[in-house]
Amino acid sequence: DAGWFSYTPLSGPQHAGISQDFWLLGLALVEIAGITTAAEIAVTILKCRAPGMTLTRMPLFAWAMLITSLMIIFAFTTLLMATVLLELDRTLGTQFFNTAAGGSDLLWQHLFWFFGHPEVYIMFIPATGIVSMITAAFAGRLVGYTLIAVAIVLTGFLSFGLWVHHMYTTGLPELAMHFFAAASLMIAIASGIQVFAWIATLWGTRPALKTPLLFILGFLFLFVLGGFTGVMVAVVPFDWQVHDTFFLVAHFHYVLIGGVVFPIFAGLHYWMPKITGRMLSDRLGVWSFWFTFIGFNGTFFPMHLMGFFGQPRRVYTYAAELGIGGYNMLATVAAFIFAMGTLLFLVNLALSLRRGQQADDNPWDGDTLEWAVASPPPVYGHLGPPLVIARHPLWQAQRHEADSAAPDERTQHIVAALHGQPTQWRGTLITDVLYAQPQAIQWLPKPTYAPLIAALGVLVGAVATLYQYYLVLPFALLLTAVIVVAWLWPRDSRLAMLDESEQTLGAATGLPVFATGTASVGWWGMVALLGVLATAFAVLFYAYLYLWLFSEQWPQDNLPRPGLAWSGAAFGVLVFSSVPQWWARRRHPREHRRPAIMGLTSATLLAALFLVWQVVEYANLPFKPQTNAYASMVFVTHFALSVTLLTALALNIAAIVRLRHKYEPVEHTGLQCQLTSMFWHFTVVVAVLVYAVIYALPYLIGT
Amino acid sequence: MMILPDNTVPGQRHIWFALLGGGVAWALHFLLAYGISEFGCEAGADAWVWLNVSAVAWMILALTVLMLTLAVAATFVAWRLAHPGEAERGPDASPAEAHHRMTRRFAGGLAIWLNGLFTFVIAFQTIPLFFYLGRC
């Protein structure tokens, strides 16, 4: 009902129907799934690389996926918070985006586009990874590895500084708009570095013009065109002319189809033989490419002109006197040609699966490790961790590699010991972030239905929320929580098996099976989670300050400022709980459990006291969340803090339960206690910020 | 029972500063400059003027100097990584040490380019300020 960007007030409670709630709830779940996947990919790339795969030897696709994953953590969290706030407006009557009650439509736009612009780079950066891999394979070399890595990191950062260029026509201060214009121009440097590196890679070589490379060449042409129009619309006065016209439609299709879809087609043709063990037909692939390329340009190039001649976006028709009927007809016909290209690919895929030529292990003479296993690969991938000593492992025997270095003995010994091991459980090697030196052996879970059942619980809860059967929601969430805890709770049998492995495999490799700190993937996962929560609270604080900025009075409507005395005492109790929590971690025993149990219990009780105060305070406030935007912000920020604190309490209780389990060696609980403490101290820091922003700041700055 | 102590690979903090310092400087500069311009202009902070430059512009100028310093510092640390002293230029003690040196030099080289570009971007995106020194 309200477009993919869902601007308020059209998406607010007065206008859009249940389809809007469907979109918001569905998007929230997809965002959570995306964030957790991103954390998993980032931690895997950082900690589970093959031994010897230092940062300088990491494939560029891995660089791309690492940066993309880190971007997702910040961008998706922002959208998640925005969708939650909008859904609260629609279902519970909060006022975040209702200007009549002190909210702001522009707040939605800021939050959405803070996600929306990085999102297009989240789509584009993996595509650049694909381009780098395929270009190198076909050229037989890679020029500019370091600069491409620089460009990927630069793009990842700069993409967060562009969002207001989607809002140039909303009347923002000119100075602010021009900061974003400057940043929008700067990001072209990053893209330009990569394009020149790819051209340099191909220059002077004689690559075979097979289908993957054709799509790469098509990408280069189309993405550069899209990039040209991108720097045009980065300029504020030019954007004012073409905003909401078909010129923008042409621009983003060139960068998204040219810049993302073409590399995807290239990647499909390149990697499908590895996945299925059968080659795709190159003849059909070439036909598919030309239909796609010609059809795409016929569809979208005329849109540049249609936009200049005044055809608006988001309107289903156009005035006949504009004289653009011919361009529209051309675009329509060409779109069918474009569709033929995709159809030909699907036919190619179907025919390949039935009677395609058997693929070799390395049909393209690629340089990276996936080509070292059979096509299709066995279920275990590599039988032991591969040892990497060059940037292009499969070329190292054939060609001169400037960065080859003999592996050290310890790593060779570990790799040999892990060949085909462990056998009783699934494990992988943990390596350090920079040097990829082995640090530990990580247990991996077996296949299980638990995540599926947990996801079904979430689905039931979401559908119940959609149709406002709120009584079902707590039961659905409880089911999910119980399943997840049961899945993750370490069984005694597993711990005993790992203990035994530490005597055998651990002794053979010199590596621990139980690791803590930066050697543990759990530590990095917790850092990712804290990054998500920090972003979520940053969004809330930004929204609070933004709404304050545009209000004539704060708190709005003469509402009383929150009292400082009792709240100061309560927050003080919560801050103090960090002391026993820290002491528990410090005393986390090799032999004695009691001090750690006492510390965790004390911290838990202090936090529980704070929660009781919070409930009493908020039950007695002279306003409700629906009163105005100020009230909505205060309630939601406190609710978010409460949920975070309840999670911290649950983690503490889980740690106490495990510590009290006398038959479990206390060393097993080291990581759990460490992660619990990290979460606890983070919660306390957030609480201090909540106190500073919600309670103290109105007194310091005045109304 | 083997427990692995934290931070088993020592001396990495300066590498992380070299790799991330410029980006963090850019991010802080950009978000704070946007915040100062949006919030400061809306709140009328450009009404206070000294030497024909508004308070908003002064704050952003000060921020720029601070963040450029941070980015340049990161570039300097990166330079030291990529161009090590005499001790690191000697023959490698072991394959592991050769491995570490190579990685540090790569990280330094990458970080020089990264921080250099971030320094340039911070300076470039401050240019609009000079057209709005006296007013928003």
Image (spheres, coloured by chain):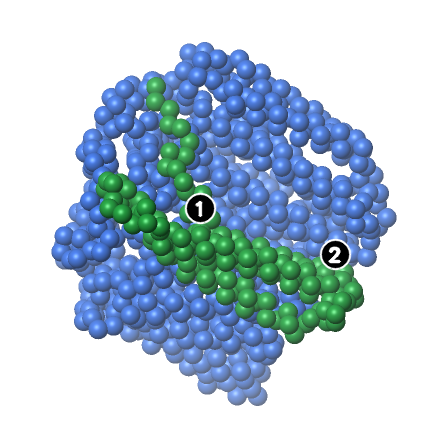
Chain colours: A blue, B green
Q: Nearer the viewer, mark 1 or mark 2?
A: 1
Q: Amino acid at mark 1?
A: His
- The residue at the point 53 percent across, 13 percent down is A594
- The residue at the point 66 percent across, 58 percent down is B35
Name the element at disc 1: helix
Can you give x and y, in whole percent of width and height, for residue A184 in the image? Answer: 52, 68
Residue A316 in view in this figure: no
Q: Nearer the viewer, residue A526 or B77?
A: B77
Q: What residue would you read off at disc 1?
A: B14
- Above or below — where is A574 with respect to A559? above
Residue sitting at the far top: A662
Question: To which quarter of the image does residue A603 belong?
Answer: top right
Can you give x and y, in whole percent of width and height, for residue A96 in the image? Answer: 70, 51
Residue sitting at the far front: B86
Residue A606 in view in this figure: yes
Host chain of mark 2: A
Q: Amino acid at mark 2?
A: Leu
Q: Nearer the viewer, residue B115 or A516?
A: B115
Host chain of mark 1: B
> In the drawing, what numbered circle is on residue A549?
2
